[in-house]
Every structure is written in C-alpha cells, then in structure tokens.
Amino acid sequence: MVEELFSNTNKYGYGGECERPVRLILRPKPKLTLVYMDEALSFNPFTWKADEPLPPEMRPPGLAGVAIVMGLSAKASHRRRGGANCLTVTFAQER
C-alpha cells in the first residue's frame, strides 16, 4: 500500500521523482493506523471520479491505488492539513 501511495505521489502529485517530502506515521494503538502525508496539490482520492464511466477493459490506468487502500483497510479518509494531503488508514484488528 505504501509503495502504491508513494509512486502515485511521485508520478501524479509531484510530477516525477524529486526531493519533496513524504511523511509516514504508524500508530499501533488503539488500532493499527497509517498516516501518509505529502505536499502535492490538494487531491482527495475518495472523491475523484473519471469524466466518463467505462467498462474495465477500456479504462485508462488510475484508481488502482484507491482500490488497494480500500481493500486493505477497515477505514480510510483524506483531509488537507497545513498545506499537505493527509491520508489516514486504519486496519482491522486480527481476532
């Protein structure tokens, strides 16, 4: 998940490899939570929609990262904080 987020930040948010920051915070309690932050332009991946819905075989690349985040998390949210995109992902606890 982190690799997908990082590569999308570089490719789409920063426009290519650069020295701009990406910050990660991992909180183990009360539930395992990942906070991923970048300073790219504001982008909420959960509200972005393609201009025109297409069948899967005709879709251009994109939104795979959103599917990965949603599929591996119990809860995910985005907010803009202090000039940064802040993606918070909470994972389900194992039983």
Image (cartoon, rainbow, N blue to C red):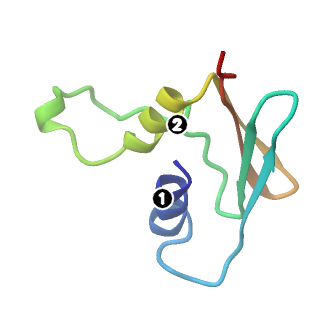
First in sequence: mark 2 or mark 1?
A: 1
* Residue 76 in the image, given as x and y percentages of width and height: 65, 30
Query: Which residue is painted at 44% across and 44% down in the image?
Result: 65
The residue under label 2 is 69
User: In the displayed image of the protein, which residue is found farthest to the top?
Assistant: 95
The residue under label 1 is 8
Query: Which residue is painted at 20% across and 28% down in the image?
Result: 54
Q: Secondary structure at mark 2?
A: helix
Dot 1 crowding, Cα within 10 Å, few <14, some 14–19, many 20+: some
Above or below — where is 26 with respect to 95? below
Above or below — where is 59 with respect to 36? above
Give the CA distance from mark 2 to mark 1: 12 Å
User: In the displayed image of the protein, which residue is found farthest to the left?
Assistant: 57
Query: Which residue is painted at 61% across and 40% down in the image?
Result: 44
- Do the residues bearing badges 2 and 1 touch, measured as CB atoms within 8 Å? no
Q: Give the foreground label among 2 and 1.
A: 2
Above or below — where is 92 with respect to 32? above
Q: Secondary structure at mark 1?
A: helix
In which quadrant of the rendered view does residue 84 lie? bottom right
* Residue 95 in the image, given as x and y percentages of width and height: 66, 15
Disc 2 marks which amino acid? Val
Disc 1 marks which amino acid? Asn
In which quadrant of the rendered view does residue 49 lie? top left
- Camera-nearest residue between 23 and 10: 23
- Camera-nearest residue between 33 and 42: 33
In the image: residue 29, left or right of residue 13: right
Query: Which residue is painted at 86% across and 33% down in the image?
Result: 29
User: In the displayed image of the protein, which residue is found farthest to the bottom?
Assistant: 19
Above or below — where is 38 with respect to 94? below
- Camera-nearest residue between 27 and 78: 27
In the image: residue 9, left or right of residue 25: left
